[in-house]
Amino acid sequence: MKIGIVCYPTYGGSGVVATELGLALANNGHQVHFITYKRPPRLNSFHENIFFHEVASMEYPLFEFAPYETSLASKLVDVVKYEDLDLLHVHYAIPHAAVAYMAKQILEAHGKFIPFITTLHGTDISLVGTDASFSPVVEFSINNSDGVTAVSKQLKQMTLDSFNITTDIRVIYNFIDFSRFKKANKDHFKKAIAPDGEKILVHTSNFRKVKRVDDVIYIFKEVLEKIPSKLLLIGDGPERQHLEDLCRKLSLCDHIRFLGKQDAIEELLSVADLFILPSENESFGLAALEAMACEVPVISSNAGGIPEVNIDGKTGYLCEIGDIQGMASRTIELLMDDEKLQQFRKNALARAEEFKIEYILPVYEDYYREILANHAIKAH
Ligand code: GMT
């Protein structure tokens, strides 16, 4: 198949999933065209089946906001037509689903029929999508997608609860590539980070309020009072300055390292004892899955789709959102019981293996074929 992928080329989960999916499709012999405003970070080497089309927004004094949607739709029309694509797969509904709909209409006027699939990732429904400034467009473009997938059962339910949905939504879970995400021997890292054998806690995110990174710091403070430990905060985002200030205020700077955005997350996860994810909202929690693949149990909130990934009392613990005491006690409990921690590490790996890319890729491929077949019937 010749597939066009549209996503945010950022460090966010939706861009990561879109890129990894595109890479896996290309490895399986499909021709994949990424159409985005920047090369996605994980798309960093040459692949004979991968093409990248950069969308340039036009600057003009009249435009206070450059009309990116128009540029993207025009680029889609161009790429679909001249590369003769079979299917478009857009990740994150806003604005990609509406843009794909517009491109599809333009292409139909040119005699080219192409279906598009929209994958819902979370905040396009939960935080942003339901805002009055977006919701009619989101609802319309979901209902007029040729296929719609959601990354968890909870996200599907939330979409059904939030909009008047008249189309089927298929749940296809996020996945993990074990050729990359596996525990490696990084003892030299461990020694550098925790020279006196301290335990290592890790959190990765885009440091937005929804991630509740403050909670990570308060949890760590409780843990540090009982167990010598270090906290690695990986990622960057709008809360970063506030978080650094909080560390200073709590006199924790000697024990917490802000590592910024990192590409080789798996190397850092390889030295971690526990992963902390206290999010307010999380449709799936790809970061937790990446940790689990590296044999790191997860202490998390029970928000959104996290319970579909992290199993309470087996691969980690789940607490109510904002229950800092609960998450701290569970962290301390696991760190103090080495036998249990080792068992949880094994359980985390076994659970992560259920989300192997090798299992999820054929599900997407079958779904693509189903949508193409339905579309062919409709076109006649
Ligand atoms: O978590 C973020 O803030 C990034 C966001 C995105 O859309 O890039 O992530 C969402 O999609 C990920 C991949 O499907 C999910 O694993 C995350 O749970 C989801 N984030 C939220 O729902 C807050």
Image: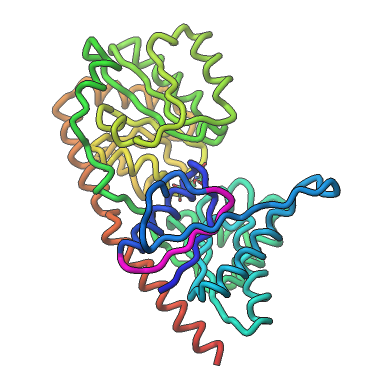
Is 104 inside the magenta-drawn segment?
Answer: no
Q: Going by the picture, which residue comes out furthest to the right?
A: 62
Question: How far from the left and from the top, in percent, is residue 291?
Answer: 31, 38
Q: Residue furthest left?
A: 339
139 up-or-down from 340: above or below: below
Tell me the residue at 50%/48% (across/down). Answer: 39
Q: Nearer the viewer, residue 273 or 310?
A: 273
Which residue sits at x=30%, y=56%? 357
On screen, residue 175 versus residue 105, left or right, reads left
Q: Can you tell which quarter of the image residue 332 is in? A: top left
Name the image quarter holding the N terminus: bottom left
* Placement of the C terminus among the 4 image quadrants: bottom right
Q: Is residue 234 visible?
A: yes
- Is residue 207 placed above or below 61 in the rendered structure? above
Q: Give, as a single range, the part of the protein colored magenta.
A: 28-38
Is residue 33 shown in magenta? yes
- Quarter occupied by residue 103: bottom right
Is residue 157 visible in this depiction of the protein?
A: no
Residue 171: % across, % down: 42, 62
Q: Residue at x 28, y 35 (%)?
A: 297
Count of numbered tags: 0
Residue 81 at what x, y percent from top left? 58, 75
**Does residue 9 appear to the left or right of 290 in the view shown?**
right
Q: Position of residue 277 (x, y in %)?
A: 41, 34
Image colouring: rainbow
Q: Which residue is depicted at the point 36% across and 63% down?
A: 26
Residue farthest to the bottom, as pictured: 380
